[in-house]
Amino acid sequence: MSVDAAPIPPRREPPDGTRHPPVMTTAVLNGAQKSTVAVRSVLIYDQRATAREALTHAVTAAISSLIHIACVADPSDLSTAFAGNPADLVLIGLHDATAGTVDAAELFLQRYPSAPVVVFGAVDDTPVLAAAVARGARGLMLWSPWCGRTPVRGFSIGARPGLRSAPQLTLIQRTVLQGMSQGRSNRDIAEALGISEDAVKSHAANLYRKLGARDRAHAVALGLRQRLVS
């Protein structure tokens, strides 16, 4: 097994001896904000060395309570590392559906369904990120090693700057979005609401516009992020 453990530099205490409270992290768990916990250990999985290095720097800088951080590049090492030292936060990179990263996340979630997993990837990876949340990941983060060292949009470490307030959806739009998040087809949603399939498509188009979504998967990801669906 190959696990890279990154040293965490010692933190200076103020002259007066006071201690700052550790950074608390908040995840969007299937649309609901859960209680915050201090993160002291992080496990990062990504096949790209550049991503592992960049995210290690970002996480180390963002979480003052961090004591241990480890990185793995192989799916089997991911499970082994977690079994040996269950981390408070597991970050799994999903960057290419053909590269095996999606399978790695799915297998890990099957083995450790209660693990605190947050998946991350670029904007183009939103569909696979949303699918991972539907399978049990606790949140998603839109980030890539080429967009800078700070995780942006979606799940964030520490504070969550820059997120727009949730758009005002009508009750039927929320119901349509909820059905989408459950993987239901337009026909199934129409039957449940007692309306036509064309009406569902019209409501979907309107909620896409309000959310700024490109498609169904993007809408679900945005809905989860803004706690519009559960």
Image (spheres, grey):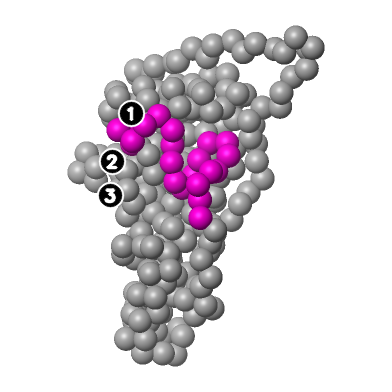
Image vertical order of residue 204 relative to residue 15, above or below: below
**In terms of depth relative to the viewer, which is nearer, 171 or 167?**
167
Dominant SS type (magenta): loop
The region drawn magenta spans 144-164
Please give left or right for residue 12 compared with residue 91 in the image.
right
Q: Which residue is mark 1?
A: 51
Please give left or right for residue 63 compared with residue 77 in the image.
right
Residue name at image x 41 percent, y 56 percent: 221
Q: Which residue is mark 3?
A: 124
Q: Residues within 10 Å of mark 2 (few under 14, many from 20)?
A: many
Q: Which mark is residue 95?
A: 2
Q: Residues within 10 Å of mark 1 (few under 14, many from 20)?
A: many
Q: Quadrant of the C terminus?
A: bottom right
For the residue marked with disc 2, what is the amino acid? His
Image vertical order of residue 14 relative to residue 178, above or below: above
* Cα–Cα span, label 2 and label 3: 9 Å
Whether the residues at callouts 2 and 3 have beta carbons within 8 Å, the answer is: no
Looking at the rendered structure, the secondary structure element under dot 3 is helix
Snapshot quadrant of residue 180: bottom left
* Cα–Cα span, label 3 and label 1: 16 Å
**Which of the marked residues, 3 or 1, is nearer the chain's N terminus?**
1
Residue name at image x 39 percent, y 36 percent: 92
Residue name at image x 36 percent, y 89 percent: 196
- Whether residue 145 appears in magenta in the rendering, the answer is yes
Whether the residues at callouts 2 and 1 have beta carbons within 8 Å, the answer is: yes
**In terms of depth relative to the viewer, which is nearer, 164 or 196?**
164
